[in-house]
Each structure stands twice: as C-alpha cells, then as structure tokens.
Amino acid sequence: MFEARLTEVQGLVQSALDATLATRPDTPLTAAMRYACQGGKRLRAFLVLEGAALYGIPATAALPAAAAVEALHAYSLVHDDMPCMDNDDLRRGLPTVHVKWDEATAVLAGDALQTLAFELCCAPVLGAADRRINLVAALAKASGGEGMVHGQALDIAAETAGRPLTIDEITALQAGKTGALIGFAAEAGAILAGADRAPLRAYADALGLAFQIADDILDVTGNEAATGKRVGKDAEAGKATFVSLLGLDGACTRAAELVAEAEAALEPFGATADNLRAAARFVIARQT
Amino acid sequence: MFEARLTEVQGLVQSALDATLATRPDTPLTAAMRYACQGGKRLRAFLVLEGAALYGIPATAALPAAAAVEALHAYSLVHDDMPCMDNDDLRRGLPTVHVKWDEATAVLAGDALQTLAFELCCAPVLGAADRRINLVAALAKASGGEGMVHGQALDIAAETAGRPLTIDEITALQAGKTGALIGFAAEAGAILAGADRAPLRAYADALGLAFQIADDILDVTGNEAATGKRVGKDAEAGKATFVSLLGLDGACTRAAELVAEAEAALEPFGATADNLRAAARFVIARQT
C-alpha cells in the first residue's frame, strides 16, 4: 500500500514538474533545471499529499505544494553538490549538474529552482489566498537562513571547527539541514486546510531526525550502487555523525524510538494516517 | 526633491533589512547576508515606494516589498560576483562576499537572501492575502528562470557563443537580466493596490532598458573610484553591449528617448508621479 502510493506520488510530482518546465525557454538553464528535478524518492511530496489527505484535500488540490517542496529540495542538492560545498560528482547515480554542465549553470539552475518552488506555492488550485500566503511564509521559514540554509552553513562550519560536534550541536545542525524541510512537507496539509499544525509538527520533528540518523547509518552500511552517491565520505572527512557519536547500534535504536514517536503523534487521525505511519517506518528501513 | 527622497528611502530600507536580520542566528551566514545588504542606490526600493504612493499607500505599508526587492537584488549580485560567474572581487567599493568569506558562504548567503525576499512579501502590513500572493507570484516571475536568472544565463552563454550578439538578442538578454526586476519594482505599488498594472509596466519597460544602456555607457565612461566596481570589463571580455552596437552617441540618444517614453507613461498620474519622472532622468545621469 505504502510503496504503491509512493510510486503513484512519484508519477504525479514528476508530471507536475515536467509540465511547469515544458513552458520554459529552450535553454541549457531549463535543461539543467529539468535534469535536477528527475528521480528521487519524493518522500517530501508524499508527506505533503498524505498530510493534505488527512484533511480531505485531494491530491490534485495539493499537488503544486508537493512539487514546490521537491523543487526546493532539488535546488538545495544542486548547490550542495558544488565543488565549494560538498564537491560531489554523483547524485542518484548520475553526474551532478556542475559536472554535466558547469558551475555557473549549477548556481543559476539552483537559484531558478528555488524561485520555482515559491512560484508553485502561488497556484490558485491550492485554495484561498490566505492559505497560500501562509504556505509561502512557512516554506521561506523552513528553507532559508533560519532553516535549511542555516543548517547547511553550520555543516560547513563544522568541517573547519577543529573539534568534533557534540550530540546537541549535530542535532541542531540536522534539525535545520534536513528536519526543517521535512517539517514543512508534513505540515503543508494542515496549512492548506487552515487546521492546527501541532499534530503533524510533532510527527515531522521525530521523522526529520530519524531520517537524518538513517542517512548517517546508510553512509556507513550502504553501497554506492544502491544509494547512487559516494558512501563513507563522512568518516573520510572525520565528520561527527550520529553513528560516530552513538555507535551503529545506538544510532539504530535511537532511530527506531523516533519512528515510534512519529507514529504516536498520528493517533488523532486513526487509520487515515496509516500511509504516514508506513512512511516513518520506511525512512529507517530504506537502502537509498 | 528626488535626491532627498532617495536618501530617505535608503534609510528606510536599510533599517527594514537590518531589523529583519537582527533576529537571525549570530553566524557567518547572517553576517554575510547583512554585509551583502549594505549600501547600493536602492533605486528598486524607491520605485516600489513611489509606485505605491501613486495609489495612496504609505511607505510603512509598502516597506517590506521594497526591502524584498533589495534582498532579491543583493542575492543576484552575490551569486553574479562569484568566480564561476562574473568573477568580481569588488562591489560598491568593498570586497565581494566570496572574497571576504568564501565561495560556500557566497552560495548560501545568496540562497538565503532570495528566500528572505519571498519571506518579506508575506508581511501582513502589506495588506490582504490576495494582494500579497500576487506580489509573491510577480516577484517569482520576474526573478526566476523566465526573468532575471534567464537573462543571467543568456549573458553567460553569450560569452562562449563565438559571435557577438545582435541588438535584438542583447535587448532580450537585458530585459531579463535587469529589466524584469526593475519592472517588478515599478509595478509592485499597483499590485499592492489591486490596480491596473499597465501604466507602471510601460514606465518600467522603458526605464529598465534605459538603466541597462546607462550601465553599458558607465562601463566605458565611468571611473572605478566613483562606480566602486571594475570598469572596462565588457570591452576587455569582447562582450557586445549597447555601446559597442550603437556607438557611444547612439547609446546616449537611445537612453534619452527611453527616458522620455518612461516619463510619458506616467501621464495619467499627473504631478504625484514627479519623483518617478525624476528617477527616470537620474537613471541615465548617474555616475555609479
């Protein structure tokens, strides 16, 4: 059920992004944007659509918000992969944008994908203007200098800090870098419905941290063919991770606890939230 | 009158940006964002506030939109100055962000300034939600892959095209690179007022092109101390500009014609638009 739904979401989101970009000028910039928007798990889009479904909002009416969070995520990956940042030449098994084109195109494609995310949040189908402006504000809060970009900057600063991070520091870093956008995705349905965001926020907080712990575990246990990116690079760089701080067993235990927390937060929604519960379990079981 | 008002706008916008950034985490990222938001002519902010004034909207109620367009402009400069783009080490007489910090900080500070621009457009003081969402949509349209970033990408492609651009190509390039955001700034008042955007759009189209022609003229006639940036670099790079295509006299004549067009477009507003008329004349008379 969960995996069938995730596959369905992947198709919906890809179509939405392709349709938007199909109207753009036929340039290398547009080609690079399209390339950066291919593939991926679409977990964030899934969270948007399933969160919206809890409030009776159909997928068609929430789809631009789901596409927005994936465009935003894609921009962050394009910039993160650049030589001055993580310097990755492989992403989802394919050359990264700055490798396939050049660094200038990577900067500009990332910039334009961020803009596209905000543009998508304006789509009238998402509902009344007050809901849409709340969505824009929440996306800005989650992704900007107090959210995701703040986390990325802390991550880069950590590499030159000359000492390993504490567990509190790495938790704060990841809350920004990964947690904030996951949190936005999970809450988007409540925003579009004009409902209380607290239950989905609690779910998202636990899920976001579990997601990052799972990423750290995968960096140790994963293989390059399955993940489509270089593995072992955190240890190589001497970076503190949840695995280096808690040990592999400790990290797995903590991730499992967080998944239980995430599932518990969905209690008010009963069985309608089963896909979101399955998503939480998927996050720590995934191989990519 | 015009210059006193421009100085006043500079103070208002700087305070608004400083106030927003004062609440941010005390990190190099925030410091770089603040640094990138210092100074500048604030012509775009002036256009927002004066455009709003035509419809009786006070500066306090339009200020976040003025700050937004300056944050957006600042982001574009930070990224544009990077080594993989224009590779400038001087901006407004000071070291550029990637020189003062590093390239990673420049990428992230630019990214976060773009986000900040959209966040500022959500400020409740700007008015009803439908006006604010229209503002967000217009800013996205003007600044993204069909507007400013599209123009920047065309500019970079032109450098490796192996032939000089035609006058039509360079006009299209500049309409995106400079014109789109100037156009947004000029129209913002009409958007906030829920009024017909056509008169300010006609003004903005002429003004934006005049602005870019003036920039090309300054690159030939300006001096580094006054402009605070390297001059002569277009000729050095063998780039086609309005001056290389029309000659210096021809470019000056075309700019003056466009200013007359811009002034004519303001006729419906009578004397209340005098500051905007003065702004159009300023654009081609400026030394920086």
Image (tube, coloured by chain):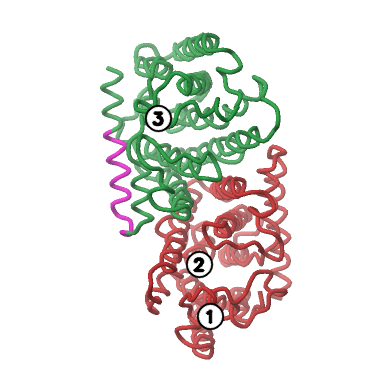
Chain colours: A red, B green
Image position, residue B135 (x, y; %): 48, 38
Judged by its main secondary structure, the magenta piece is helix
Q: Nearer the viewer, residue B210 or A197?
A: B210
Mark 2 crowdedness (10 Å alpha carbons): few <14, some 14-19, many ≥20: many
- Tell me the element at label 3: helix
Task: Tell me if mark 3 has few (under 14), some (14-19) or many (20+) residues whose alpha carbon lies within 10 angstroms of its own.
Answer: many
Q: From the viewer's perspective, is the residue at label 1 or at label 3 nearer?
A: 3
Residue occupying the far front of the picture: B236
Q: Amino acid at mark 3?
A: Val
Q: Would residue B158 be found to the left or right of residue B51 on screen? A: right
Marks 3 and 2, how far apart at CA: 35 Å
Residue indicated by mark 1 = A263
Q: Dots 3 and 2: beta carbons under 8 Å? A: no
Label disc, if present, on residue B48 of the rendered structure? 3
Disc 1 marks a residue whose amino acid type is: Glu
**Where in the figure is residue A233, as x and y percent of width and height?**
57, 73
Q: Nearer the viewer, mark 3 or mark 2?
A: 2
Which SS class for mark 1? helix
Tag 1 subunit: A
What is the magenta range? B11-26
Q: Position of residue A215 (x, y in %)?
A: 57, 75
Tell me which numbered mark, 1 or 2, is placed earlier along the sequence. Answer: 2
Query: Does the image show residue A127?
Result: no
- Give the residue pinned by disc 2: A178
Lateral position of residue A242 relative to residue A35, left or right: left
Q: Residue at x 69, y 69 (%)?
A: A228
